[in-house]
Structures are given as C-alpha cells and as structure tokens.
Image (cartoon, rainbow, N blue to C red):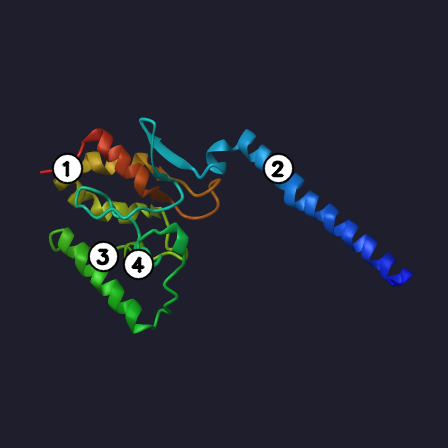
Amino acid sequence: MKSPALKNTLRPALTLFILLGVLLGGIYPAIVTGLAQAFFPHQANGSVIERRGVAVGSELIGQNFSGPGYFWGRPSAAGNFPNNGMASGGSNLGPTNPALKQAAEERAKALSEASDGSRRAIPIDLLTASGSGLDPHISPAAADYQAMRVAQARGLEIERVRALIRNNSEAPQWGLFGEPRVNVLKLNLALDEVAPLVVK
C-alpha cells in the first residue's frame, strides 16, 4: 500500500511534468513557429533562393562550384560530400598540423593553375574551411582573385565582373558585426543572368 507521503510527492511531480510537457513541447513551439512564419517567413523556411519558381539553394549553405566560369566558395570540411548540411563541422586541424598545411598548399596550387599560374597572394578564405564547413560567403578579395578567370570563361570584360562582385557584396551586419562578404550562390546566379554559360 502506497504511503501518503509517496502519493503527495508523485502527484505534484506528475502534474508539473504534464504541465511543462504541454507548455514547452506544444504551446511554446507553436507560438514561436507562428511568429516566425508571420514576421520572418523567408528565414523561417530556410532562406531558400528561388529562380523562376525553382529552389536552387539556400542563402545559408554553400554549394560546390568547380567550373572555371563560376566563382568558387570556401573549402568545405563537411565530410566526404562538400557542403553537406548533415555533416556540418570544421576540419579541427590546428595551425601547426602538417595535414592542414598540405591541404592549403594543394588548394593554392589548384587555384593558381585555374588562374593561369597567377602568383597573386591567395586570400586565406579560399584555402581554409570555416568552422561549420558550410560557409556560403567569401570575402570580396577572394571574389576579386577569381574575377579574371570567370571573365575569361564567360567572355566578359573584367570590369563587368568586378561590378557584379560589388553589387553582390554585403556590408557587416548593421555596419558593426562581421566583415564585408559576398554570397557565392547569389553572385553566380547574377553572373548567369548577365552572361549565361554556354556548355561546349
């Protein structure tokens, strides 16, 4: 037979459990979801970018562009598949790790060869992955480094490509937080609108 003390302890514990379950597992998420859909629907639904009614990606997750006629994003450390949202994470290699140095050197060689052996200093964000491995942005300097290669592949004047970079550059958040940046997907979409890439 249960003691009165046990009964008096279980009843409030179960009541609190059920109350918090309903409040935090149902009511609170419903309110937050409703407010997000009402005031920030684009962000709440993944910041998806559409072209002609077709989803082409998200503003928040990088894509693996590799053709000479496109701007390339940051290297991705997200597992075996670049920019895999299910495997977000950095390389976790310290600055003195030989594997990090080797990876950076290989990327530098590939970038230099794609730019006809350019000896220009390569911006660091083109050589190293971000903490998430999914960064959709590069610095304006990283975009400018690639501008000549893209211009030649597209048959555009270099200044036209640089104008696209400027027009698709984002300032620091509220002018205070972060650095100027360029969303690679948006820039490549703008490039496709100006000079569609002809596949030979």
Mark 1: amino acid:
Arg
Disc 1 crowd, CA 10 A, few/some/many (<14, 14-19, 20+): many
Q: CA distance from mark 2 to mark 4?
A: 36 Å
**How many discs mark residues in the rendered view?**
4
Disc 3 marks which residue? 121
Distance of label 3 from label 4 (alpha carbons) = 28 Å
**Label 1, label 4: how far apart the Cα atoms are:** 30 Å
Give the number of the disc on residue 80: 4
What x and y, as percent, mark residue 114?
15, 52
Q: Nearer the viewer, mark 1 or mark 3?
A: 1
Asked whether 65 or 144 is in front, the reply is 65
Comes first in the chain, label 1 or label 3: 3
Secondary element at tag 4: loop
Q: Estimate the x, y position of residue 89 in percent, counting from the top left.
A: 40, 58
Is the C-beta separation of discs 3 and 4 under 8 Å?
A: no
CB of mark 1 within 8 Å of CB of mark 3? no
Please report whichever mark, 1 or 4, sits nearer to the chain's N-terminal start.
4
CA separation in Å, label 2 and label 3: 51 Å
Q: Amino acid at mark 4?
A: Asn
Mark 4 crowdedness (10 Å alpha carbons): few <14, some 14-19, many ≥20: few
